[in-house]
Image (spheres, helix red, strand yellow):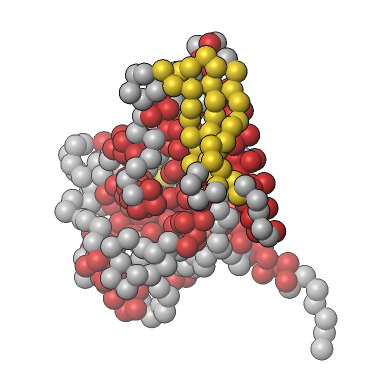
Amino acid sequence: MAIYIRTKELSDGRLSLYLDFYPPLKGKDGKPTRREFLKRYLFKKPKNEEEKRLNRENQLFADSARIKREREFLNEQDGIFDSKNRNKDFIEFFRDLADKRKASKGNYDNWLSSLNHLIAFTNGQCVMNDLNEGFCEKFKAYLLDAKRLNSVKKLKLGQNSALSYFNKFRTAVNNAFESRLTNDNPLKHVKGINQKETHREFLTLEELQTLAKTECDLEALKMAALFSAMTGLRWSDIDTLNWKDIQSTEGGYFIHIIQRKTSDTIMHPISDKAVLLLGKRGDPNDKIFEGLKYSDSNNDKIKRWVLKAGIHKKITLHNFRHTYATLLLNKGTDIYTVSKMLGHKNIQTTMIYSKVLTQTKINAANVIDIEL
């Protein structure tokens, strides 16, 4: 198979770039064809530096397209790639991957948001052959400048949201490549979006003690929040926790569950006091926090409870998990152990907690003592 880059002169004087195949290939209509137009053009007689620059860029694009097609033919001959996959719908492939995450609502919602942004970016038209380095870079740039979908005020998408959505897109592209639906991985030279540092609010041990002594509008909500601070469990796992999930050995109590976010099976040690907080044990298959749902109403109850305790911090249910991680580090627990206790797959995720004002830092600040 030989592939050449050729041009066809148009009526406006531009040159349309196309690939010339010999011998001919089967086109989309099943008929043999020698041409694949690249939808890129050259100025026959460039008048200025800008037109010269565009000519250079489009010539480079055409050369990359030729190399890509040559690689496809070689891989097809070796049984690595089937060129028929080039026109498979990437949007539907992405949707199927998202649907597999339905068991974890938070994760599924992120996948769905990423998919909806991809649909907005492509007008719902994207096949496997569209996935190249330039496409990935443009989608990344789109996310960094995008507005939130279904937002009345058209608020800009936060950088960490853009990071999350681009990571879902990255996973989908990698899956397509691993499934041999693309000939090459277009992301291998595309850098990810940097995470923006955010302030993660947490409670001190004294504040937790105060909350434990303060009444809450909903007792089950208070128990769930304190239990999260004592165990580090995500709300999605607390919400589905049954009495049979809390087990014991000679070494103490532990929780044996499949995490909803990661689908990993964990045996998570917890303290005697965390078990004591739950009160009298119920039937094995009963939910421990029956009837407790994540809602704006319950978040309002959390706010009132925190204010009633005299604590002026913006606290939600998720901040109790942050509190768990911060207090462990504050008490000298090594970050690797904290990462395992939180169920993080990547220790870099845990590193965000190491930037808080821990007791170790406070002690270091007071090492140099000068009498004044």
Give whichever of 141, 320 is nearer the camera: 141
171 up-or-down from 239: above or below: above
Residue at position x 60%, y 31% from top?
5
Residue at position x 50%, y 11% from top?
79
189 up-or-down from 279: above or below: above
Give whichever of 193, 140 is nearer the camera: 140
Asked whether residue 235 appears in the rendered view, the answer is yes
**If the image is split into quadrants, where does the N terminus sit?**
top right
Location of residue 361 in the rendering, given as x and y in whole percent from the top left corner: 68, 65
Location of residue 105 in the rendering, given as x and y in whole percent from the top left corner: 29, 47
Residue at position x 43%, y 50% from top?
165
Quarter of the image where one finds residue 287: top left
Location of residue 196 in the rendering, given as x and y in whole percent from the top left corner: 55, 61
**If the image is split into quadrants, where does the C terminus sit?**
bottom right
Q: Is residue 298 left or right of residue 61?
A: left
Residue furthest to the bottom: 372
Residue at position x 73%, y 67% from top?
364
Q: In this view, does 297 lie to the left or right of 124?
A: left
Give whichever of 245, 279 is nearer the camera: 245
Location of residue 61 in the rendering, given as x and y in whole percent from the top left corner: 60, 40
Mark count:
0
Residue furthest to the top: 78
63 up-or-down from 356: above or below: above
Asked whether residue 173 appears in the rendered view, the answer is no
